[in-house]
Image (cartoon, grey):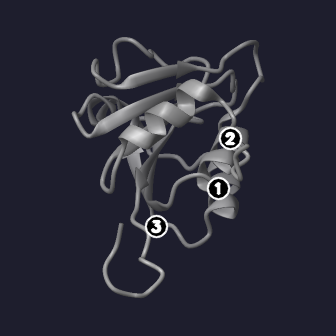
Amino acid sequence: MLFTKCIHPQLLSALAKLGHGSWILISDGGYPHLTASNPNAEKVFLNLAQGLLNVTQILEVLKETVPVEAAAVMTPPDGAMQPVFDEYKSVMPDVPFEYVRQFDFYERAKESNVGLLVASGDMRNYANLLIKVGFIRHPDGQGTY
């Protein structure tokens, strides 16, 4: 039995292959999953139906499974802030956020350090999120792992 809330075998396997500095894309239901992501990234499709699961729900589980060092959200071309961003910040209040315009976000999501894409059924506007895997300080204070 696992201590983590996450019990999805493919997702756990993909997370185990990532390391410090790897990025995870949690995408909304309208994201171009195949054409705007790293072709070598593991792709986990959790988009069963509209609204199931949403990005925030997936983020809440991932945040309890891996350390998160940084985040980037997709903004519309005009850079307008979206209501969903406040939700993400409430889940990760100590994580710095970067705001990336839509087409620049697509390019970032294609980079080789994006090792995992998790597709959601989220139908909210610009609900796409990149999170950077952080590091864990060793319990004895000597280094990280």
Q: Taking 60 as reference, is 16 left or right?
A: left
**Nearer the observer, 98 or 64:** 64
Residue identified by numbered label 3: 96
To which quarter of the image does residue 117 belong?
A: top left
Question: Residue placed at 71% from the left, 32% from the top?
Answer: 54
To which quarter of the image does residue 46 belong?
A: top right
Identify the mark nearer the N-term, 1 or 2.
2
Residue identified by numbered label 1: 64
Q: Taking 94 as reference, is 140 left or right?
A: left
Q: CA distance from mark 1 to mark 3?
A: 17 Å
Q: Residue furthest bottom?
A: 141
**Nearer the observer, 26 or 100:** 26
Q: Residue furthest front?
A: 1
Crowding at dot 3, Cα within 10 Å, few <14 / some 14-19 / many 20+, comes out as few
The numbered mark at residue 35 is none
Of tags 3 and 2, which is closer to the observer? 2
Question: Residue placed at 66% from the left, 39% from the top?
Answer: 58
Identify the mark nearer the N-term, 1 or 3.
1
* CB atoms of marks 3 and 2 within 8 Å: no
Question: Residue placed at 69% from the left, 30% from the top?
Answer: 124
* CB atoms of marks 1 and 2 within 8 Å: yes
The N terminus lies in quadrant: top right
Tell me which amino acid carries mark 1.
Answer: Glu
Residue identified by numbered label 2: 6
Identify the mark nearer the N-term, 3 or 2.
2
